Image (spheres, coloured by chain):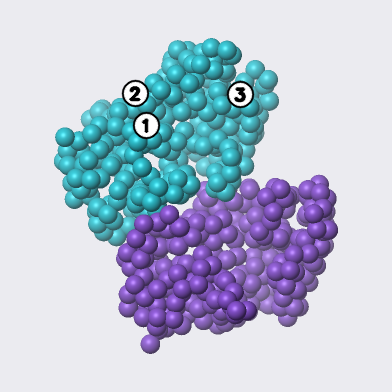
Chain colours: A cyan, B purple
């Protein structure tokens, strides 16, 4: 029987810490983005869950195809507002807007978007870390899965998960391998892993040949097939591996809790 | 017979490009540091070779144990000088001075020290790359060693070589593994590599069990034993592997050429 690394319990333990801080003082999170469907769904769901944890969510929408200056000004304004404790900017953004994240004040940068925050992450210095890779590590910690000296194979080299997670796993003393679409014999590389983290958005990418009975698999893939949410891990691999963080119900709920945790940590500084 | 990846030829081909640019217009490189012995040796040698390539090297020394403000001001002043095309700050620096690199203007940041430059590297965007990992890749390219889809194992996770090289190798579509002091069965991990890059400063770390007859080994280690320069690779491993970039005479000379190349590239923008 595969051990299921459920995100619910882990998220609850993080929310307990958040609640103990917001009980003393409310926190305000501002989001800035365009009326993109998936972004709006995300910020709406953020607003709903923030209300349960003493957090006020202000969702600011800039017009679609607005000028870069317009978008930048919106980010700058909320960053400068004394009433706002944390700022989140729509991700991913069309390339022409990518630089607006530099206007997120680094003391309010809840998801590590500002280049200065990224440099702190890269250099392994103190600072906020992006919510999704933080959630992966929090979930593994919650289930007491050792990382030091372990072979961690990350499938996917994106800026949102693969790269920051690689750096954070190195800080945790794991031996880290990063794989991607150009990796040769991916199944062989994965089979040697103690922990696989897959963040590709390709359904059934991780098949049973990728895992052994000892592998811990963290699924961070997200795709939609016939309107249903899918991860990267196949049914057969799920059944064969030692432990699995599934999609949905794994890293997802922890990511949101981690975002709120970052917010209250920042606010307390 | 091991193929020796000599840095000399590769450096010369880079210097040829540098010379063709400085023939039109001289470039000025300013260095800022304390009177630390190895830094002064380095900047002196930089000044000597720069003279041969139409580059003027201005070495600015700040007093030992000066205030952080003093050091920062010196960096800021040369960065603002219209006569200076590139700025290099002593590395490594004592922790209290680490932040002075943010005063290196990013348009003059020849060795990718400013956090904004580091974020560009991290995000895989256009920008200057640090000289040493650039030299590793230039040397492998010079000898037509394929990187795409290859297993590249980097031994060492430092900010100067290990981490930036990992990101740059990912951009080159290599499958990248980063190892370090906490890696378990390091020799086994290395034996599976197509290319090993070792940047540890531990003599004889890479023994013959780490390599096969097919391995390409790039030695970026630097240590001193009885006054003699040593790399990380043992004699036996050197003889057994397919190709070796040795210490001295491998990446070292290419690094300096690459620094000058970065300088003239920056100046031409």
Q: Is residue A21 visible?
A: yes
Q: Residue furthest front?
A: B226
Q: Residue A268 shows which numbered tag? A: 3
Badge 1: residue crowd in 10 Å (few <14, some 14–19, many ≥20): some
Q: Residue A9 shows which numbered tag? A: 2
Tag 1–tag 2 contact (CB < 8 Å):
yes
Q: Nearer the viewer, residue B149 or A73?
A: B149
* SS under mark 3: loop
Residue B88 falls in image quadrant: bottom right
Q: Position of residue B115 (x, y in %)?
A: 63, 48
* SS under mark 1: helix
Chain assignment, label 3: A
Residue behind mark 1: A142
Residue located at (34% from left, 27% from top): A7
Q: Position of residue B166 (x, y in %)?
A: 47, 57
- Point out the tag, 1 or 2, that comes first from the N-terminus: 2
Residue located at (23% from left, 34% from top): A3
Q: Nearer the viewer, residue A32 or B160?
A: B160
Q: Is residue A44 above or below residue B197?
A: above
Residue located at (44% from left, 49% from top): A173
């Amino acid at each position: 029987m595969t051990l299921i690394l459920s995100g619910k319990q882990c998220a609850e333990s993080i929310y307990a810490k958040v609640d103990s801080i917001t009980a003393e003082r409310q926190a305000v999170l501002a989001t800035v983005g365009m009326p993109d469907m998936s972004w709006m769904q995300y910020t709406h769901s953020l607003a709903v869950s923030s209300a349960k944890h003493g957090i006020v969510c202000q969702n600011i929408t800039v017009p679609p195809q607005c000028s870069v200056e317009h978008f930048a000004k919106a980010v700058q304004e909320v960053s400068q507002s004394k009433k706002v404790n944390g700022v989140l900017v729509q991700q991913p953004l069309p390339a022409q807007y990518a630089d607006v994240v530099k206007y997120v004040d680094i003391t309010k940068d809840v998801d590590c978007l500002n280049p200065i925050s990224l440099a702190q992450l890269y250099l392994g210095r103190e600072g906020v870390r992006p919510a999704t890779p933080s959630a992966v590590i929090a979930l593994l910690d919650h289930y007491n899965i050792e990382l030091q000296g372990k072979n961690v194979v990350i499938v996917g080299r994106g800026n949102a998960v693969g790269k920051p997670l690689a750096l954070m796993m190195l800080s945790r003393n794991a031996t880290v391998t990063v794989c991607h679409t150009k990796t040769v014999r991916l199944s062989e590389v994965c089979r040697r892993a103690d922990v696989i983290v897959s963040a590709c958005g390709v359904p059934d990418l991780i098949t049973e040949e990728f895992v052994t009975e000892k592998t811990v698999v963290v699924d961070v893939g997200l795709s939609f097939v016939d309107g249903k949410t899918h991860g990267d891990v196949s049914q057969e691999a799920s059944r064969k591996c030692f432990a699995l963080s599934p999609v949905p119900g794994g890293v997802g709920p922890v990511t949101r809790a981690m975002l709120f945790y970052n917010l209250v940590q920042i606010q307390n500084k």
